Amino acid sequence: MERTIQEVARLAGVTSRTLRHYDELGLVRPSSVGAGGIRRYDAEALVRLQRVLLLRELGLGLPAIARVLEGRADDAEALRAHREWLRQEQDRLARQLASVEATIESLERTEEPMAEDMFDGFDHTRYKDEVEERWGKDAYATSDAWWRGMGDDERRDWQARSAQLGADWIAAAEAGIAPDSDEAQELARRHVEWLAGIPGTPGAVKEYVTGLGELYVADPRFAANYGGEQGAAFVRDALRVYAEAHL
Amino acid sequence: MERTIQEVARLAGVTSRTLRHYDELGLVRPSSVGAGGIRRYDAEALVRLQRVLLLRELGLGLPAIARVLEGRADDAEALRAHREWLRQEQDRLARQLASVEATIESLERTEEPMAEDMFDGFDHTRYKDEVEERWGKDAYATSDAWWRGMGDDERRDWQARSAQLGADWIAAAEAGIAPDSDEAQELARRHVEWLAGIPGTPGAVKEYVTGLGELYVADPRFAANYGGEQGAAFVRDALRVYAEAHL
DNA sequence: CTAGACGTTGACGCAACGTCAACCGCAAGC
DNA sequence: GCTTGCGGTTGACGTTGCGTCAACGTCTAG
């Protein structure tokens, strides 16, 4: 009562290629092999295949399945571990989806008031006078030229990225995490990276970064970008820790 | 004002390997290349890198990012498509998680009453007399020996799979889908596969499968397994359609 | 005897890099 | 002048689970 590889494939709803793959991995071996290497499967092999497919449908990896089949792992245990996996993946996806939606909205929102809000989210280029006073006329001119040289898409992406950075800062501040926590420091790193992408800025220079942090707190126009004075203070603290450690 | 590959990597929070990879793909090329192929990146390249990282954080694939950067695709459009992706993935994960949890519960529940419920979910081997009468003494003996020859783990997996098949049938019947729909036919395929894994059964034989369907409806003991008479009727209809088409 | 259906064993491809391996260039210390 | 060490380079393989050729054997029906 043995079946050919095609019969088994049809029954199990997989391709013969998959069965050969499982044979190769030792997951499901044919009960016997005939002339020319022809594989034949009996009912026992089918049951083994069903165990594999059950676990595979649940999302377990083939190595994990192999461990269960070899008796080197408990199936309930493997599934509990896998459940954790799934939950974390679910969280990750939820966060990513929220980010994507925020970004789409941000992209669509900034389409119209392009002229007015051109410098929105720019920090130091947003206010020409302040910039010139603090970093020199040259810096402002460089940044401005760079900005004007951008295409529309680039500009929109840049704004989306800036908006997202601000949103992430606010979220982190509201979550009540510490400015020296890994999460906040990762945000600081992104902030510095973001600054470094603006020509005319000193970039990743310790004094510039820490000074900017103070500016955020002192000036409500900047602070608004980072969730008010509270949020701006959080940004300042995180940036200071980061600058001390890495710049 | 150009930076080395390591500086850029540190600023952007990626490895230099990633930057070389992006160069190779044409995603982010260095602004200039010095002696010995040394890559140097200017602010413009950094901005381009930031666009890539923004989209990558949102989960877009590198080819999709490339299309956006080349202006061959709209970024908002790409993100909307990606949002659909994410939603479907979320659904898939939710379903898988529910399945895993049901299976874990099933595995844990059947641990104790192993002796009594040994034949639970077995359909035709559950009731010795009926089986012998319908399919002959030989069939019962074969199935019984096969079952007794199983290890505990295999038995539990088998039961979990059986229970899940029943649960999926009930869910499908309650969802109100048609017996000849793709979804129901896939269940029928699984059912036949499941039957084929039991030695002593005729297996994937048209008359056996359709006859079994009638039995499910006629006998409340079986019907209970498939959500009562209503559910059993659904199973019967789906099995009949499948048998006609494929057996 | 041959065509055709089905079987076999490699081997490449995919996504996004991580991780060697083997080599080169440059600066500092002996 | 030579070694050591850091940082740069270009391949090339490994990862997950098969899909998809390619090239070739085997079995059966006409």
Image: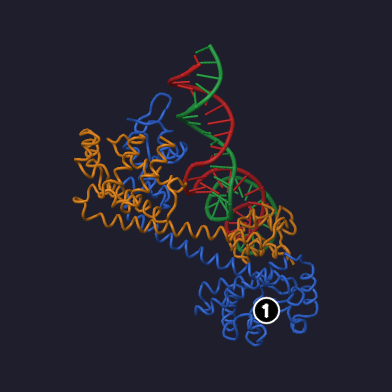
Chain colours: A blue, B orange, C green, D red
Identity of the residue drawn at 47% across and 62% down: A90
The relative height of residue A118 versus residue B245 in the rendered view (above or below) is below
Of residues A189 and B200, the one nearer the viewer is: B200
Quarter occupied by the N terminus of chain B: bottom right
Quarter occupied by the C terminus of chain B: top left
Chain at tag 1 = A
User: Where does residue A5 sit, x and y in percent of width and height?
Assistant: 42, 33
Q: Secondary structure at mark 1?
A: helix
Residue holding disc 1:
A208
User: Where does residue A77 sit, x and y in percent of width and height?
Assistant: 33, 56
Q: Tell me the kind of residue under disc 1.
A: Tyr
Q: Determine whether, in the image, residue B177 is placed left or right of residue B45.
A: left
Of residues B124 and B61, the one nearer the viewer is: B124
The relative height of residue B81 versus residue D22 in the rendered view (above or below) is below
User: Where does residue D28 sit, x and y in percent of width and height?
Assistant: 44, 20
Quarter-wise, where is residue A225 in the image?
Answer: bottom right
Identity of the residue drawn at 25% across and 45% down: B151
Please give the count of numbered marks on the rendered protein.
Answer: 1
Of residues B145 and B222, the one nearer the viewer is: B222
Identity of the residue drawn at 77% across and 66% down: A150
User: Where does residue C23 sit, x and y in percent of width and height?
Assistant: 64, 46
Instruction: Count residues near mark 1 (Cα–Cα under 10 Å), then give few for <14, some for 14-19, many for 20+.
Output: some
Quarter-wise, where is residue A50 in the image?
Answer: top left
Q: Determine whether, in the image, residue B30 is placed left or right of residue B153.
A: right
